[in-house]
Amino acid sequence: MKYVMFLYTESDKIKARKLRDYLQGRLRNIADLRSIGEISAEKRDFRNELRCNGDCVVLVGSRHAFSLIKGKQQEADDDFLTFDGKVIHEEFSGNREFIDKLIIVYLATERANDDWIPDGLDEKRIFNLQGVKIVESPLLYQLEYSIRKILLGDSFMM
């Protein structure tokens, strides 16, 4: 089974979970979607999981998320880590292997010029789903296609 790391802040949680549930249903035969909170609840190290099991990474982009990444800060809820801007910044800045696994999805805000986008990220892997209902649509099919392409390479059929 492949793993998709689904990264979002607490403030993006409601919309992010809707998208995650939709994608988990569509990808259930090939991948399991996991959040930092789930990894933390299992007492696992996020950095290690990202390196070993991060076959694809979907980052929900928002002002708050990019602020945490730029500031290399973490976010926690109770005793569990929910977002780790430090690890994301360190692992994705200049690391082609990780950048090639990354997809950024905007759910609640539009992309801004000062957003944290790692150098070398293909623009086709940045999706603006602001105002889009999380039901079957061409844009969600394109997002699913991009995830499948990262997970399975060019040899898969939709």
Image: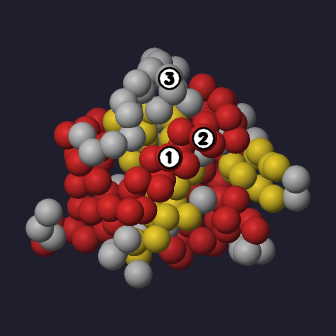
- Looking at the rendered structure, the kind of residue marked 2 is Ile
Give the colour scheme shown: secondary structure
* Element on which disc 1 rests: helix
Single out the mark in the foreground, 3 or 2.
Answer: 2
Q: Which residue corresponds to the image point at 46% horizontal and 71% vertical from the top-left? A: 32
Upstream in the sequence, badge 3 or badge 2?
Answer: 2
- Marks 2/1: CA distance? 7 Å
* Element on which disc 2 rests: helix
**Dot 1 alpha-carbon crowd within 10 angstroms: few under 14, some 14 to 19, many 20 or more:** some
Upstream in the sequence, badge 1 or badge 3?
Answer: 1
Instruction: Tell me whether the residue at label 3 lies in contact with that at label 2, contact meaning CB atoms closer than 8 angstroms.
Output: no
- Looking at the rendered structure, the kind of residue marked 1 is Lys
Is residue 62 visible in the rendered image? The answer is yes
Q: Which residue corresponds to the image point at 14% horizontal and 63% vertical from the top-left? A: 158
**Dot 2 alpha-carbon crowd within 10 angstroms: few under 14, some 14 to 19, many 20 or more:** few
73 or 65: nearer the viewer:
65
**Dot 3 alpha-carbon crowd within 10 angstroms: few under 14, some 14 to 19, many 20 or more:** some
Is residue 96 visible in the rendered image? The answer is no
Position of residue 74 in the picture relative to residue 11 (left or right): right
Residue 37 image offset from top left, x and y in percent: 70, 59
89 or 140: nearer the viewer:
140
Residue 14 image offset from top left, x and y in percent: 60, 40
Q: What residue sits right under mark 1 in the picture?
A: 18
